[in-house]
């Protein structure tokens, strides 16, 4: 049969449950640790930071399926199911026998997959009777998505935006404000941890770790307020599973199954969401797809990080997670043009990679990423986000391998968003001003040296 360029599931085919990947993992990720006692954290110890239902989702390793609340489903139906596209024009351009598919998450105002978890987290906070939320944002997609969700549920929101992105992406900042949120460049003088970071490094461009510290301080010192996070956490991976569930159902309708699944990786939520049902097949011995995580060479947590317990924030107030990390004090280079700038990686993704279930991680330089982005835009007519373009880069590389070997593999990658608010980066690329930065071992060593010493675990 002739496979269409785009397949949209019907509203009736929209998944009604999220899939908890941890329930089928052969070995669980190591538990989060209390930052004071270094003991495994109990669910109730998370209540001052997260609302109670999200804390329960964070620590639940056994429930395989979670029902999506009706109120969340109603918002999902405004932009989901998202399309599964066959990249015929890219295939022809590359002269490859590969079948290339991409799951496109850019058809909502936030321009990315982030809304999938933002809606859920805002809903649970509202249900608990909370009145406001705080968060961090790097490239701005998460801040935009959460501002949308909070506006829908009538909640106040404060967004601490990494200062480098705040300055590079003024239009993303203004969308967040348009939805009623307060946006503060981080680190700032509005929090004690921000003041301390600025005192130590007045010219810092900031990091997600800095912004997380500020957001948590604001949440824990404000009545009726909680903190929410757009990646890394188990609860976010759970909500993002809807991406992979839709993709798998659509591919089944087309009689296809991916040989290779590729996702960009910063904190790991979109990658985990895309691979979730396909990873389930692998864990259960049903299929054996090849998974590739793609990260920026300037922030290489999987490819050059250490698998260790670390703080999730620069201020060292969050619970500790065992993950691939560059150290909580790591600051990406100022010339880093996209998101994917977190110092660590989802504990779920980290464990799957450490144990060999996630097959491969690749780090790519940003000029090569934008080479792929421009090619994709020209032939597929979608301007991709810099983050998504990491996955596009490797999808193109794999399709070229198929051309060279004659193998007609099926490739699936996640197009997590659009690049319409990243024009400063595109401008730098088009004008030949974009440069690549790859940290040396010496550059990474201070972050590794700051890893916590935990009696009996890391000493």
Image (cartoon, rainbow, N blue to C red):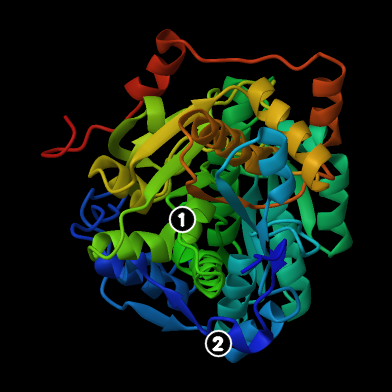
Helix, strand or loop status at disc 1:
loop
The nearer-to-camera label among 2 and 1 is 1
272 relative position to 225: left or right: left
> Which residue is the site of mark 1?
258
Sequence order check: which comes first, mark 2 or mark 1? 2
Pick the quarter of the image with the C terminus: top left
Location of residue 449 by image quarter = top left
Image mark for residue 119: none
Pick the quarter of the image with the N terminus: bottom right
Residue 159 in view (yes/no): no
**Spot occupied by residue 298 in the image (x, y as percentages of width and height):** 55, 23
Residue 448 in view (yes/no): yes
Location of residue 113 by image quarter = bottom right
| Badge 2 density bin: few <14, some 14–19, many ≥20, Cα 10 Å | few
Q: Is residue 125 above or below residue 439?
A: below
48 relative position to 96: left or right: left
**Spot occupied by residue 102 in the image (x, y as percentages of width and height):** 62, 54
**Residue 118 versus residue 51: which sits nearer the camera?**
118
Location of residue 253 by image quarter = bottom right
**Spot occupied by residue 430 in the image (x, y as percentages of width and height):** 85, 22
Helix, strand or loop status at disc 2:
loop
> Which residue is the site of mark 2?
69
């Amino acid at each position: 049969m002739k496979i269409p360029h785009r397949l949209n599931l019907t509203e009736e085919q929209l998944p009604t449950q999220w899939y908890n990947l941890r329930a089928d993992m052969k070995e669980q990720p190591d538990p989060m640790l209390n930052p004071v006692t270094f003991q495994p954290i109990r669910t109730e110890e998370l209540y001052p930071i997260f609302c109670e239902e999200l804390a329960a989702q964070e620590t639940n390793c056994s429930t395989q399926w979670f029902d999506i609340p009706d109120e969340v489903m109603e918002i999902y139906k405004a932009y989901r199911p998202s399309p599964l596209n066959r990249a015929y024009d890219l295939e022809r351009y590359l002269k490859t026998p590969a079948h290339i598919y991409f799951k496109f998450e850019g058809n909502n105002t936030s321009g990315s997959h982030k809304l999938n978890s933002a809606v859920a987290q805002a809903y649970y906070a509202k249900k608990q009777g909370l009145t406001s939320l705080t968060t961090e944002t790097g490239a701005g997609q998460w801040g935009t998505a959460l501002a949308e969700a909070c506006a829908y549920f009538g909640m106040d929101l404060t967004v601490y935006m990494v200062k480098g992105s705040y300055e590079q992406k003024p239009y993303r900042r203004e969308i967040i404000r348009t939805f009623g949120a307060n946006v503060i460049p981080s680190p700032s003088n509005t929090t004690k941890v921000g003041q301390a970071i600025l005192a130590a490094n007045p010219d810092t461009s900031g990091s997600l770790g800095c912004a997380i510290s500020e957001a948590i301080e604001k949440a824990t010192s404000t009545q009726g307020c909680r903190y929410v996070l757009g990646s890394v956490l188990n609860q976010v991976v759970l909500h993002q599973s809807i991406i992979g569930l839709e993709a798998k159902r659509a591919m089944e309708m087309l009689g296809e199954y991916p040989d290779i699944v590729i996702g960009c990786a910063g904190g790991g939520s979109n990658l985990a969401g895309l691979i979730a049902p396909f990873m389930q097949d692998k864990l259960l011995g049903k299929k054996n797809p090849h998974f590739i995580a793609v990260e920026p060479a300037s922030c290489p947590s999987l490819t050059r990080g250490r698998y260790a317990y670390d703080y999730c924030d620069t201020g060292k107030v969050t619970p500790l997670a065992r993950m691939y990390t560059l150290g909580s004090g790591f600051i990406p280079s100022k010339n880093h043009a996209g998101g994917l700038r977190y110092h660590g990686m989802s504990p779920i993704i980290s464990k799957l990679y450490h144990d060999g279930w996630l097959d491969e991680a690749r780090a790519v330089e940003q000029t090569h990423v934008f080479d792929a982005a421009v090619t994709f835009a020209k032939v597929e007519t979608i301007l991709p986000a810099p983050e998504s373009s990491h996955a596009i880069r490797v999808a193109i590389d794999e399709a070229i391998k198929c051309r060279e070997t004659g193998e007609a593999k099926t490739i699936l990658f996640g197009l997590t968003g659009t690049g319409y608010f990243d024009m400063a980066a595109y401008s730098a690329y088009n004008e030949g001003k974009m440069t690549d930065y790859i940290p040396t071992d010496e550059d990474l060593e201070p972050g590794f040296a700051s890893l916590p010493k935990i009696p009996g675990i890391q000493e």
